[in-house]
Amino acid sequence: AQSVTQLGSHVSVSEGALVLLRCNYSSSVPPYLFWYVQYPNQGLQLLLKYTSAATLVKGINGFEAEFKKSETSFHLTKPSAHMSDAAEYFCAVSDPSFQKLVFGTGTRLLVSP
Amino acid sequence: DAGVIQSPRHEVTEMGQEVTLRCKPISGHNSLFWYRQTMMRGLELLIYFNNNVPIDDSGMPEDRFSAKMPNASFSTLKIQPSEPRDSAVYFCASAKGTEAFFGQGTRLTVV
C-alpha cells in the first residue's frame, strides 16, 4: 500500500519569504510523486511530478521539489512567496503503473502582506 | 480541449433520493478516477477505471454507491439512496500517462 503524510495542515508565510511544504511517502515499490494545488471552488491542478528521472523537479509558478529516497520525502519549496500562492496544496503518490493516485490530507498555505 | 467536464456543479437533494453525478473525461485519456473531498476525510479515491473497466473500487464506501463507464467519453457515479453524510464535493479526473486532470467538482448537499 502507498500513502503520503503532509506535516502541517496550515503554513503561514509573509510575502517574499521562503515556502516549504512537507511531504513524506510510504511505498513498497518505487514511487511516482506529485504536488497539486487547489484554489477555492476549483479542481486540483498539477504543479510538478517525479517519475524516476531527475530527483530535483521544477514545476509551474516557480515551485520545485526534491525527491530524497533516504528520507522518504518530497518537500515542495518556492524561494519567494506571492499573495497569489495562497491555496491548498496536496502531495500524492502512485506506483509506476499509475493505477491508484493517493493524496495526502493537504496543507493550506496562507500568505500575508 | 475543454478539460474534464462534470455536471451538475451543485446538487441539493433530500435524504433517500437517488443522485447521479456525471463526468466527461478529456478525449484520448484512458484512465478515470472518482474522488470525494470532505473537510474531515480529505480527498478519498472512490474508484478507478482503465480503458472503461473498473480496476479498483475498494474506496467505494457502501453498496449505495455505484459507478459506471459505458464508453470512453462518459462516466457516472450514482448514490441510491442518498444520506446526509454523503454531502461532499465529488471530483472526476482523467489521465493519459502520469498526469491527472481534474474537473471542477460537483458539490453535493443531502438534506
Image: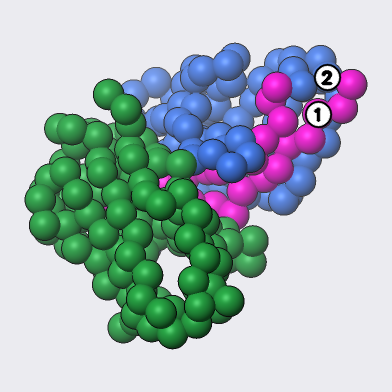
Chain colours: A blue, B green
Q: Quadrant of residue A85?
A: top right
Instruction: Tell me, yes or no, whether dots 2 and 1 are on the same chain.
Output: yes
Q: Is residue A64 left or right of residue B26?
A: right
Residue nearest the observer in this picture, A63 or A66: A63
Check disc 1: other Cα within 10 Å, few if <14, some if 14-19, many if 20+. Answer: many
| Vertical side of B33 occupied by B97: above or below | above
Q: Is residue B76 above or below residue A15?
A: below
Can see residue A39?
A: yes
Rendering coords of residue A33 (x, y %): 43, 39
Which quadrant is home to the C terminus of chain A? top right
Residue A61 x %, y %:
58, 16
Residue that carries the numbered disc 1 in the rendered image: A111
- Answer above or below: position of A61 versus B83: above
Seen at 63% across and 40% down, the residue is: A40
Classify B99 as above or below B11: above
- Residue contact between numbered discs 2 and 1, judged by CB atoms under 8 Å: yes
Chain of the residue displaying label 1? A
- Magenta residues, start to end: A84-113
Quadrant location, the N terminus of chain A: bottom left
Mark 2 or mark 1, which has the lower sequence index? 2
Q: Residue at point 47% right, 32% down?
A: A45
Residue A103 part of the magenta segment: yes
Task: Give the structural element (helix, strand or loop) at label 1.
Answer: strand
Give the residue at x 51% y 18%.
A60
Question: What amino acid is at disc 1?
Answer: Val
Marks 2 and 1, how far apart at CA: 6 Å
Chain letter for mark 2:
A
